[in-house]
Structures are given as C-alpha cells and as structure tokens.
Image (cartoon, rainbow, N blue to C red):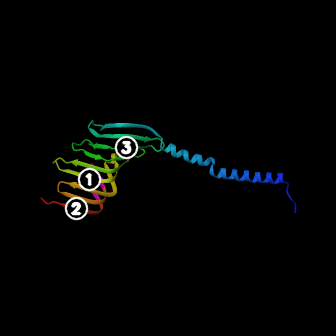
Amino acid sequence: MMSLSPTLRLGLLALALTTLLAAIGYWNIRPESFMASAPLEEAETIDFYAEKARSIQFQADGSLDYRLTAERLEHVQATDLTRISAPALLLHRGREQPWQVRSQRGEVLPGGDQVELIEQVQVERTDARGRQIRLHTERLSVFPEREFASTAAAVRIEAANGVTTATGLEAYFKDGRMRLLSNVRGQHEIR
C-alpha cells in the first residue's frame, strides 16, 4: 500500500474542499436565480399614477357617456393592469337616470374592456318613476362597452318592494334587467 506525502494529502483535501464549495455555491447562487427575481420586480413597476382622478367621456352625439372618479390610479407597466382605489362611476350612456357603481378597489384589465370591482361593490339606479334599486356584492366584472356586468359571488338586491338574495348575477345596464343565477331567495311586500 502506497502512502501519500503530507503535502500531497493536504493538496488533495484542499482540492476536494474547493470543488465542494464551488458546487454548493453554484447550486445556491446560480445566475438563473438572479434572473428569476428580476421579472417579479419589473411586473410591479408602476409607470404612472394619479391621485384624485376624474374622467368624463361623451358620446358621439355630445351626450354624457360616463363620469369616473377615484382616490388613486396606478398603472403597472409590464402587465398593462390599472389598479383603482375607491372607484365611483356614473354610467349615463345618454340616459337621464344613470347607473351609479362604487367599490373599495378595482382593476382595469389590459385593453380596458373589462373592469373588476372588488370589495363592497354597490350598484344603484333610480328609475323614471323615482323607484330606487341597489345591488350589493363583493366582486363584479363590468364590461363598459357592452353595458354588461356579472359575478359568481353572493348578491343582495334591495328594491322598493323587497329584498332578493342570490348567488351569481348577470346585469344588462342598457335594458335595466338582471338575471339571477342560483340560490335565489326573496322577501317582497305586496301593495
């Protein structure tokens, strides 16, 4: 059996230890691990924001389309998502009795075709005869151009003649009609 000199033994041990440390370092600190965290930071980059925002839009004939106010708007550059704090929308669409839509927060999805209203969503309208209707839910997807909204969440509708609850809803703003999807319960007063 051949014996190694103490210098050679120490050199091999140092080489093994160096190789082990390099391997551990590579597994824990790879260049890919730094690249993976970069998109997360970029995904949250806000390229513009507005406080106490107000927007008014008119239709082609000059009649009022809508008024939107919000405490704060933040646009996320990488995803084209706009976060809204305390949005309030008056949806006229040229009609005298507007729909009033409010929530604690919201998100305008890329392209602006869909708005997600989140937390304490309230939709109200008073008709031509002065009757008021209020809808409450925790989440509502609004499609402004289609004058349509929907939710799979629980809803509560308060009208002049009673209260209706349901799970899920489709609302057609143009017609003033709502379709309740399931678990419909009502308590109505007959006059």
> Residue 61 at what x, y percent from top left?
27, 37
**Where the C terminus falls, by quadrant?**
bottom left
Which residue ends up furthest to the front in the rendered image?
Answer: 6
Image side of residue 93 versus residue 16, left or right: left
Dot 1: element:
strand
- Whichever of labels 2 and 3 marks the residue nearer the N terminus, that label is 3
- Whichever of labels 3 and 1 marks the residue nearer the N terminus, that label is 3
Badge 3 amino acid: Ile
Residue 84 is tagged as 3
Q: Which residue is mark 1?
A: 135
Q: Are marks 3 and 1 in contact (CB under 8 Å)?
A: no
Q: Which residue is mark 2?
A: 186
**Which residue is drawn at the image coordinates 37% and 43% (left, top)?**
84
Dot 2: element:
strand
For the stretch drawn in magenta, the main secondary structure is strand
Viewer-nearest residue: 170 or 87: 87
**Which residue is drawn at the image coordinates 25% and 63% (left, top)?**
185
**Where the N terminus falls, by quadrant?**
bottom right
Badge 2 amino acid: Gly
Viewer-nearest residue: 37 or 176: 37
The quadrant holding residue 4 is bottom right
2 vs 3, front mark: 3
> Residue 17 at what x, y percent from top left?
73, 53
**Which residue is drawn at the image coordinates 75% and 54% (left, top)?**
16
